[in-house]
Image (tube, rainbow, N blue to C red):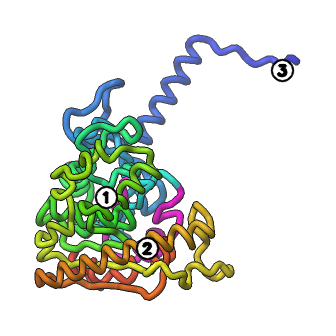
C-alpha cells in the first residue's frame, strides 16, 4: 500500500527545478516571448521547433482568427539559396486527422523532399473550405482562412525563410475548391495552382449540396454561417466557376477520376491501403463523390475553354475519391507547379 519513501524537496529545490523547466521550454520555443494570457495585435510567428533536420513547425498567431495556427514547413535541402514556396493544403480534416498528405502518401517525405522548394502545410481549418466565414460557427469556430492564407501567412513565411517571393498552391477534395478560390481573392500571389478532385461549382444547387455534405454532414457545421442560406449572394461571390475569368495568367492543373474503381482500389498488398473510413466506403462513397466531382471538373474545363484560358487537365478513366490517385495527381502536376514557381521541372 505504501511505496518507498521519496526524498523531500525543499522550497529552494522546487524553485530551482521550475526555473530549469522554464529555461528548457524557452530554448525549445526559441520565438519572441509572448506574455501569459496575451496575444499579439498583429499576425506573428510566436514559436518555432525543428521536427527533424528538414522540417520546421511554426506556431503562427492569426489576428483574423484570434488563435494560434500550427504550420509545418519542409525546407529545401539547400536552404541557403532563395527558393519559392508551395502551399500544400490537406482535405476536409484540415490536417487535424489521419487523412493527410504526410500520413497517406509519400509526396512530402519523398517526392517533394527532392525539389528545391519550401513546402508549407497549415494544420487546422477542418471542414472550413479554407474560406472566410460570415459568422462564427458553434461547432467549427471562427474561420477566416482566406485572410490567413493570403494576407497573414505568406509575409511571415517570406520573412522567416530565404524565399524568392514566387508561390504555388495545391489541394485536394474540399481544398481542391479552395485552391481555385484563393488566387481569385489574391491576384498575383500565386503563379501556379493544382486542384485534385475539387468541385469548382459551389453556387448552383448541386454544388451547394456537395458543400453541405462536407461541412454539415461530415463536419457538423452550418453553411449558413459560411456563406448564408441558399440564394445568398456570397455563394456566387465565392464560386470559382462563375469567376473563372480571374484565373487567367495562372499555370493551372486540374485532375479528376470517374468514380470507377481503378488500380488504387485493389488492395493486394502492392497498392495503396484504403482510406481512414475503410475499403467499402472508399469504393462506394468515394466512387459516388468522384463521379460528381468529375462532372464539376468537366464543366470547369468547358468554362475555361470558352474563356480562352489554358490549363493542363488530367482526366483519368478510373479512380475513386482517395489518396492513391491524389498522390499520382500531385506528381503529374509537378511540371505545371514548377513552371509557375520558376524552378526546373
User: Residue 111 location in percent, x, y?
Assistant: 44, 77
Residue positioned 43% across, 63% down in the render: 54
Which stretch appears magenta? 98-122
Q: Quadrant of the N terminus?
A: top right
Task: Determine the secondary structure under disc 1.
Answer: helix
The circle on residue 4 is: 3
Task: Determine the secondary structure under disc 3.
Answer: loop
User: Residue 63 location in percent, x, y?
Assistant: 23, 38
- Residue closest to the eye, 264 or 342: 264
Residue 155 visible in the current orientation: no
In the shown orientation, is residue 331 left or right of residue 238? right
- Residue closest to the eye, 228 or 80: 228
Check contact, mark 3 vs mark 1: CB within 8 A: no
Residue positioned 17% across, 75% down in the render: 250
Examine the rendered structure and indicate whether residue 247 appears above or below residue 345: above
Give the distance between the C-alpha atoms of the residues marked 3 and 2, in whole angstroms. Answer: 62 Å
Q: Quadrant of the C terminus?
A: bottom left
Residue topped by disc 1: 208
User: Residue 178 location in percent, x, y?
Assistant: 28, 61
Q: Nearer the viewer, mark 2 or mark 1?
A: 1
Q: In this view, which residue lies farthest toward the bottom?
A: 317
Examine the rendered structure and indicate whether residue 115 appears above or below residue 19: below
Give the distance between the C-alpha atoms of the residues marked 2 and 1, in whole angstroms. Answer: 16 Å
Residue positioned 32% across, 68% down in the render: 199
Residue topped by disc 2: 290
Q: Nearer the viewer, mark 3 or mark 2?
A: 2
Check contact, mark 2 vs mark 1: CB within 8 A: no
Amino acid at each position: 500500500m505504501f511505496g518507498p519513501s521519496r526524498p523531500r524537496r525543499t522550497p529552494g529545490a522546487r524553485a530551482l527545478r521550475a526555473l530549469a523547466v522554464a529555461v528548457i521550454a524557452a530554448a525549445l520555443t526559441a520565438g519572441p516571448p509572448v506574455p501569459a494570457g496575451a496575444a499579439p495585435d498583429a499576425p506573428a510567428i510566436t514559436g518555432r521547433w525543428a521536427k527533424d533536420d528538414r522540417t520546421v513547425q511554426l506556431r503562427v498567431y492569426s489576428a483574423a482568427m484570434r488563435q494560434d495556427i500550427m504550420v509545418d514547413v519542409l525546407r529545401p535541402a539547400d536552404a541557403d539559396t532563395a527558393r519559392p514556396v508551395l502551399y500544400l493544403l490537406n482535405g476536409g480534416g484540415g490536417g487535424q486527422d489521419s487523412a493527410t498528405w504526410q500520413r497517406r502518401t509519400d509526396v512530402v517525405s519523398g517526392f517533394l523532399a527532392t525539389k528545391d522548394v519550401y513546402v508549407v502545410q497549415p494544420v487546422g481549418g477542418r471542414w472550413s473550405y479554407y474560406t472566410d466565414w460570415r459568422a462564427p460557427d458553434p461547432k467549427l469556430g471562427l474561420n477566416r482562412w482566406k485572410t490567413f492564407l493570403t494576407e497573414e501567412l505568406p509575409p511571415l513565411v517570406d520573412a522567416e525563410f530565404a524565399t524568392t517571393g514566387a508561390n504555388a498552391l495545391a489541394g485536394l477534395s474540399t481544398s481542391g475548391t479552395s485552391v481555385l478560390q484563393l488566387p481569385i481573392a489574391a491576384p498575383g500571389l500565386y503563379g501556379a495552382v493544382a486542384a485534385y478532385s475539387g468541385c469548382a461549382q459551389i453556387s448552383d444547387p448541386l454544388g451547394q449540396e456537395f458543400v453541405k455534405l462536407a461541412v454539415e454532414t461530415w463536419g457538423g457545421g452550418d453553411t449558413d454561417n459560411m456563406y448564408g442560406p441558399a440564394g445568398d449572394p456570397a455563394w456566387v461571390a465565392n464560386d470559382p466557376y462563375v469567376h473563372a475569368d480571374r484565373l487567367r495568367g495562372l499555370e493551372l492543373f486540374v485532375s479528376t477520376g470517374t468514380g470507377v474503381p481503378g488500380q488504387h482500389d485493389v488492395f493486394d498488398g502492392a497498392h495503396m491501403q484504403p482510406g481512414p473510413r475503410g475499403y467499402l466506403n472508399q469504393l462506394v462513397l468515394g466512387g459516388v463523390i468522384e463521379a460528381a466531382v468529375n462532372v464539376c471538373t468537366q464543366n470547369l474545363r468547358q468554362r475555361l475553354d470558352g474563356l480562352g484560358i489554358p490549363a493542363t487537365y488530367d482526366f483519368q478513366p478510373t479512380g475513386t475519391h482517395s489518396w492513391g490517385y491524389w498522390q499520382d495527381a500531385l506528381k503529374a502536376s509537378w511540371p505545371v507547379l514548377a513552371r509557375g514557381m520558376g524552378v526546373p521541372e
